[in-house]
Image (tube, rainbow, N blue to C red):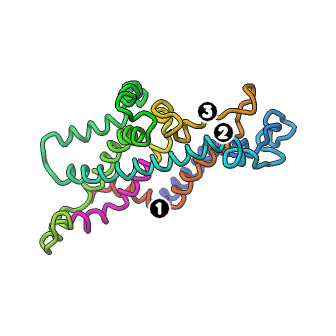
Amino acid sequence: METNTSDRTRNWLAIAAIPIIIWTCIPLVWILAESLTSTEALGDPTQKLFGNFWPKHMTWENYQLIFTGGARNLFLPALAHSVIVCVSATVISVVLATFCAYAIARLNFPGKKLILTTALGVSFFPVIAMVTPLFNLWRQIGLFDTIPGLIIPYLALTVPLSIWILSAFFQQIPWEMEQAAQVDGATTWQAFRKVIVPLAAPGVFTTAIIAFFTAWNDFVFSLNLTSENARTVPAALAFFTGASQFTQPTGAICAAAVVVTIPVVILVLVFQRRIVAGLTSGAVKG
């Protein structure tokens, strides 16, 4: 009886999720449709299908514009900056958060709960409140419009969140396993590297994905703390221009948005099992 009730509940939840999924996917499909629409067809409903939604004749001219056309000098460097900055910020934040979370989970010291609370509070701190003082400080010390000048603010976003997530995973790992490794002759560092880190791999991987998404989607820091030398894609989209001052580059912006969304979609599809395993393993008390 309990199994039938559980199956019935699961079926109803699946049915209820269908309209939510459709509602979520419609904007993404619309962006894809606009990226495949020519400039002439953007404002002409007669050249579209399904109520001015999908183009009758798809074209790749918007993608050619951002990769080989007039927008390549703005888009391609910004794409390279996004990869460099986000990967660097993710690696640094995960390494720092791993050591910090391990210390919080394994050691008893005054202020441990305060550190976790502060990390959670910083994660929710409004980004726009930090832009103005960082802008003035970065211009004075020479970090404005530089790659390090963008990585450091991203660490302020990713490190606290990573500490909070990873501390939950380390707390679920039995302390006896590390002690057994030390009894067998392993040092504290060897026990951490060969026992604890492999056991916490799902949590570390999940944290890295979340940190990467946080940095990849940032707009405020990139727009205000960079210019041409370190600007990432989200901010670069705001500087796209049309053929004239009266033309809105909707197609090119949508094409660039599709390109920068592809890495996120690929990561989620390829590693969805590890992400789910990492998100759920820290929620089960061992």
The percent position of residue 188, horizontal first and vertical second, equals: 16, 63
Identify the main secondary structure in magenta: helix
Q: Are marks 2 and 1 in contact (CB under 8 Å)?
A: no
Task: Please determine whether, in this image, residue 40 is positioned above or below residue 181.
Answer: above
The percent position of residue 31, horizontal first and vertical second, equals: 67, 42
Residue 253 shows which numbered tag?
Answer: 2
Q: Please state which of the two labelled residues, at mark 2 or mark 1, is closer to the viewer.
A: 2
Which residues make up the magenta segment?
191-212
The earlier-in-sequence mark between 2 and 1 is 2
Q: Which residue is mark 1?
A: 273
Residue drawn at x 55%, y 43% is 78
Residue drawn at x 27%, y 36% is 118
Nearer to the camera, 186 or 91: 91
Crowd around label 2: few <14 · some 14–19 · many ≥20 (10 Å): many
* In the image, residue 62 lies in the stretch drawn in magenta: no
Say what amino acid the circle numbered 1 marks.
Arg
Say what amino acid the circle numbered 2 marks.
Ile
Crowd around label 1: few <14 · some 14–19 · many ≥20 (10 Å): few
- Identify the image quadrant of residue 147: top left
